[in-house]
Every structure is written in C-alpha cells, then in structure tokens.
Image: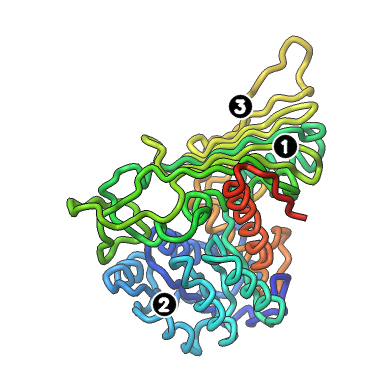
C-alpha cells in the first residue's frame, strides 16, 4: 500500500533500515537515512537503527557501511529479506532486479522505497503496482526532485494560480556521464530504446513535469539517438557506468538511447517538450525547466538550486522582468530542513533524498507532518507508461500516442 499505514513501531522502539545497493545513489540513500532524524524536528520519530548495507561487490558494501555508520555489510540481498531485525529497505540496484528484490521484501513484511525507474519493463512495473495494491506494507518510488524546495515552490506557484493558466513547459536533463567512449559497459547501456537516457534521466524530468503542470495526456515527436554504439567490456566494481574509463577495446554493443526528445500535451491543454541526454559534453548533472503561464513564468536550474527565477504581473508598471528569488523558509521543506534554514544558504540534491526519506518514514509510522506522500509503485508504473509511449511514438515516426 502507498498511503499512510498504521504505526509500525512505538516511539521508543528503534526502526531498523537497510539499503540494497552501495553505488552512488545507494550511498545517497544510506546518508539520507542517517540524517532523517535531524530535519523537521524529532517529535514522534523513533531512533533510527542503521542495520545493514548490501552490495554484490563487497568493497562497495564495506565502504558504505564504514562511511555512514551502518552495523553490517552483506553481499547477498536475500540476507536483507531474511533478516528479522529490518523494517524498512531502500532498493537501489539495477532496474532489472527491482521487481524480484521488491517482491521478496514486501512478502517478508518490509516497507520498500525503490529507486526510479520502477523497473526494466512495463510488465515488471505493472506486477509491482499490483503487488503494492495487495500488500499491507508501505511502498514508494524515489522521485526525489519533487522534494527539492525550489522545485516544490514553483509547483505551488502553479497550483495557486500565480502564473495564470499554464501554457508551456520546457524541461531538460543533460548529463555527460556517457560522453567518453572509454566508459565501460554497464546495465545503464542495456535494454530497449527508451530505457537508456529516457529511463534514467527522463523518468525524473517527466515526474517533475507532471508534478508542476499536472497529468500528461499525450506525447508526440518521439525520437532517439545512440551516439556511442559500442563500449569496452564491463568491469567489476563499476556502478552503473559512471566515473571510470578503461583502455580496453570497445566491443560490446550499446542497446539503448543516449539522447531522447519528445513533445507532450497536458490534460490542462498546456503543451511542452523534454530533451534528455547522457552524452552532453561538459554537463555533469544539468537539470533545468521553465514553465510559462498567461500571467507569469518561473524557471529552475539545478546548478543554481538555491534560487528560482520568477517573472509575473505583481511588479509595478515599468519594473517587470525576471527576478531572482532565493530559496527561503516560505519554500516547502526549507524551514527545519537544515541547521541553517535561512535565505542564501540554499539546498542541494543530497538534501532532497533526506526529505524523501523523512516523508517515507512518516508513512511507515502513520504520522502526518504535512508532507506529500512518496509516489507509489502505481505512479512509477504510470511514468514508465509515458516513457513507453515516447518509444512507440519514435518507432512510428513521431506519431501522437494517447495516454488515456
């Protein structure tokens, strides 16, 4: 289930957490659980016991355990499933493993926070959504950008009508982690068209688009490009095909998209476009979007995440134009979200994982601190349906694909 559950533990009894996967994102989840009791006050929050880190590559597991203060490191995720001292688990492994790991954890009575995209195929994602509907534990998907104070503030401007009727959304997620052809093969580069840059990066910006502008009704103009079609063989200890190069010959075929682009129409009638790339030279992690309405516009740039740009009709005549608004305690998650919660300090991508963990913890405990629920497996399945529609549009020469 994805809504508020009954309290899983008393306030005095520790809640035990584990993380499966100790690569970049797994370590970020491990850190989030370590920090979860330090934000937004501690009333009603039990002690958090950092029980275990799991990774099939033992050096990763041991490193994360030691860095973040977890009790033990294991190499077999079944050990987490079978452990009777673990309540909550973050699943941060390759997409193809999500269904099997999550199913076993849910059946073992553990609450599951699964990274995006929900799975490697629509069939597996649908099965996970069905599992959620029939379970008695809390489940959710890690669409963490909706927890960023600046992103959430823009979404509030839209919901409050401050920008008028939304007309246009333009989103970009550009990364350069795959631009070097000597980066070795990894799970990110395997799978059908639509599971590459679109699945990895597009899942985030698609969720942001719907979070800000509402449901997407249809997509069209889908197109993919694979720029680097072969890579050197995979190496032990390479997590997801980032941050390492090798001198071996490029002999393994890249199966999916390096670049994806599509247009969309929202239920409201607004239109938009999304472009994602994992071969964007010089851009380590660039996520940006602009939303335009009939009475204003707002923009977000992850590289300047401590601010948003706003332009609306509230300024005096002759003084209109884009203005920088520093993130501040009136933004969602900002007040109480750090030990220095005043304007000018800003917030980072790391902190949004902590806020996500806190929201998920509230659901497990049955607390209502006013945070939106973590998106469900069903929502994760919907996001994959949108990506699948983009793939079908691309295969049909850009044809419009309805999602209703």
Q: Measure the alpha-carbon separation of dots 1 and 3.
A: 25 Å
Residue at the spot 53% in from the left edge and 53% down from the top edge: 194
Q: Is residue 123 left or right of residue 82?
A: right
Looking at the image, can residue 329 be seen? Answer: no
Q: Judging from the image, what secondary structure is the residue with disc 2 in? A: strand
Q: Nearer the viewer, mark 1 or mark 3?
A: 1
Residue 195 visible to an observer of this rendering: yes
Q: Are marks 3 and 2 in contact (CB under 8 Å)?
A: no
* Disc nearer the start of the sequence (2/1): 2
Provide the residue designation for mark 2.
52
Q: Secondary structure at mark 1?
A: strand
Residue at image point 45% right, 82% down: 80
Q: Quadrant of the N terminus?
A: bottom right
Numbered marks: total: 3
Q: Say left or right for 400 vs 201.
A: right
Which circle marks residue 271 in the picture?
1
Disc 1: CA contacts within 10 A as few (<14), some (14-19) or many (>=20): many
**Which residue occupies 76% across, 33% down?**
167
């Amino acid at each position: 289930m994805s809504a508020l559950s009954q309290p899983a533990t008393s306030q005095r009894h520790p809640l035990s957490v584990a993380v499966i996967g100790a690569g970049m994102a797994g370590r970020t989840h491990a850190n989030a659980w370590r920090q979860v009791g330090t934000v937004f006050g501690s009333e009603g929050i039990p002690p958090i016991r950092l029980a275990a880190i799991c990774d099939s590559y033992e050096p990763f597991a041991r490193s994360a355990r030691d860095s973040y203060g977890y009790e033990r490191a294991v190499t077999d995720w079944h050990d987490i499933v079978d452990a009777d001292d673990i309540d909550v688990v973050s699943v941060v492994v390759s997409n193809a493993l999500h269904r099997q790991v999550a199913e076993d954890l849910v059946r073992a009575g553990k609450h599951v926070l699964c990274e995006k995209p929900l799975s490697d195929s629509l069939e597996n994602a649908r099965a996970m959504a069905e599992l959620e509907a029939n379970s008695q534990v809390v489940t959710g998907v890690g669409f963490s950008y909706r927890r960023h104070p600046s992103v959430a503030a823009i979404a509030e401007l839209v919901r409050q009508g401050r920008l008028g009727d939304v007309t246009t959304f333009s989103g970009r997620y550009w990364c350069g982690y795959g631009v070097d052809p000597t980066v070795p093969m990894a799970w990110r580069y395997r799978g059908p068209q639509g599971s590459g840059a679109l699945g990895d990066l597009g899942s985030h910006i698609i969720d942001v688009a719907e979070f800000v502008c509402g449901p997407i009704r249809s997509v069209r103009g889908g197109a993919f490009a694979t720029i680097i079609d072969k890579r050197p063989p995979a190496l032990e200890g390479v997590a997801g095909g980032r941050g390492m190069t090798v001198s071996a010959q490029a002999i393994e075929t890249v199966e999916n998209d390096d670049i994806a682009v599509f247009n969309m129409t929202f239920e409201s009638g607004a239109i938009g476009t999304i472009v994602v790339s994992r071969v964007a030279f010089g851009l380590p992690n660039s996520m940006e979007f602009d939303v335009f309405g009939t009475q204003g516009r707002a923009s977000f740039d992850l590289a300047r995440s401590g601010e948003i740009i706003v332009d609306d009709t509230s300024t005096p005549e002759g003084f209109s134009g884009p203005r920088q608004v520093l993130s501040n305690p009136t933004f969602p998650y900002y007040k109480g979200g750090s030990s220095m919660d005043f304007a000018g300090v800003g917030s980072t991508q790391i902190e949004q994982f902590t806020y996500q963990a806190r929201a998920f913890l509230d659901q497990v405990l049955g607390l209502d601190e006013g945070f939106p629920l973590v998106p469900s497996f069903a929502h994760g399945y919907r996001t994959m349906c949108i990506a699948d529609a983009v793939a079908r549009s691309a295969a049909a020469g850009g044809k419009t694909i309805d999602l209703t």
